[in-house]
């Protein structure tokens, strides 16, 4: 019974953040024409206001993010072209990272460095993930499960640790950069500020939630390989 409770608690801690982030962002994605301008347009306006004309605004399929190496704010199509509260608020959050970069914000520099350091471990982990199922089918040896777990931890566990470690930086981008810009520029409609705060909090947790969910999937596959 205690084991079952422990499993439920762990699952809730892993699944809960992901569900909350997804629910929050989707909730305020409607109506999709609430604002006169798109998220991409607002990102450009805010970047120009921050004297960051050299920073690009691009569409991506890899999730909303700011790339400090390419100097680009990248938004998924629904945010780039959308006119919802979620679209403009997430755009402001990513511009917040660009401003952190402009100001030499140390935690952002640290995360960029950590990601570069972790890249080889993630590549090794990805290779192990590809090989482990083949070994499992060919040998039925317990070592395959251990290999899969090791690959998952190297590939996804490293990312999860980095995102957890740099969560304060994400919250800083939301509440010390994005929200003041939205308020001072009067970009939010009356009554939308409390909702924008929820979106900004969810935006800060996005990568952490995604990493936790992926780790859960690794745990499921490991359990299957152990059978």
Image (tube, rainbow, N blue to C red):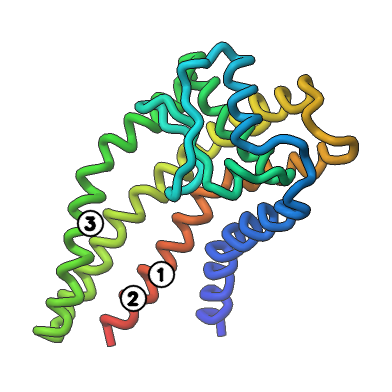
Q: Secondary structure at mark 2?
A: helix
- Residue 19, position in %: x, y? 62, 63
Q: Secondary structure at mark 1?
A: helix
Viewport quadrant of the N terminus: bottom right
The label on residue 125 is: 3
Density class for disc 2 (Cα within 10 Å; few <14, some 14-19, many ≥20) is some
Disc 2 target residue? 221
Q: Residue at x 73, y 51 (%)?
A: 32
Viewport quadrant of the C terminus: bottom left
Density class for disc 1 (Cα within 10 Å; few <14, some 14-19, many ≥20) is few
Residue furthest top as drawn: 51
Nearer to me, 186 or 1: 186
- Residue 4, position in %: x, y? 54, 81
Disc 1 target residue? 217
Nearer to me, 226 or 179: 179
Label 2 and label 1: CA atoms lie apart by: 6 Å
Q: In the rendered structure, are the residues bearing label 2 and label 1 in contact, judged by CB atoms less than 8 Å apart?
A: yes
Left or right, residue 90 beside residue 225:
right
Q: In the rendered structure, are the residues bearing label 2 and label 3 in contact, judged by CB atoms less than 8 Å apart?
A: no
Nearer to me, 13 or 171: 171
Residue 132 position by quadrant: bottom left
Q: Residue at x 40, y 47 (%)?
A: 161
């Amino acid at each position: 019974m205690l084991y079952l409770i422990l499993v439920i608690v762990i699952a809730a801690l892993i699944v809960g953040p992901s569900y909350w982030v997804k629910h929050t962002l989707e909730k305020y994605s409607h109506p999709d024409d609430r604002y006169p301008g798109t998220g991409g347009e607002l990102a450009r306006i805010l970047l120009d206001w921050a004297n960051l004309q050299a920073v690009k605004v691009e569409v991506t399929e890899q999730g909303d993010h700011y790339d400090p190496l390419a100097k680009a704010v990248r938004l998924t199509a629904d945010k780039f072209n959308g006119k919802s509260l979620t679209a403009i608020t997430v755009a402001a959050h990513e511009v917040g990272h660009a401003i952190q970069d402009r100001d030499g914000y140390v935690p952002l520099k640290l995360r960029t460095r950590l990601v570069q350091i972790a890249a080889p471990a993630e590549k090794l982990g990805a290779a192990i993930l590809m090989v482990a199922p083949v070994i499992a089918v060919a040998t039925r040896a317990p070592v395959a499960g251990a290999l899969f777990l090791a690959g998952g931890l190297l590939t996804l566990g490293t990312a999860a640790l980095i995102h957890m470690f740099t969560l304060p930086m994400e919250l800083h981008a939301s509440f010390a950069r994005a929200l003041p810009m939205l308020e001072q520029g009067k970009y939010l409609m009356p009554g939308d500020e409390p909702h924008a705060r929820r979106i900004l909090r969810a935006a800060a947790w996005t990568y952490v939630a995604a990493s936790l969910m992926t780790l859960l999937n690794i745990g499921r596959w490991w359990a299957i390989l152990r059978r």
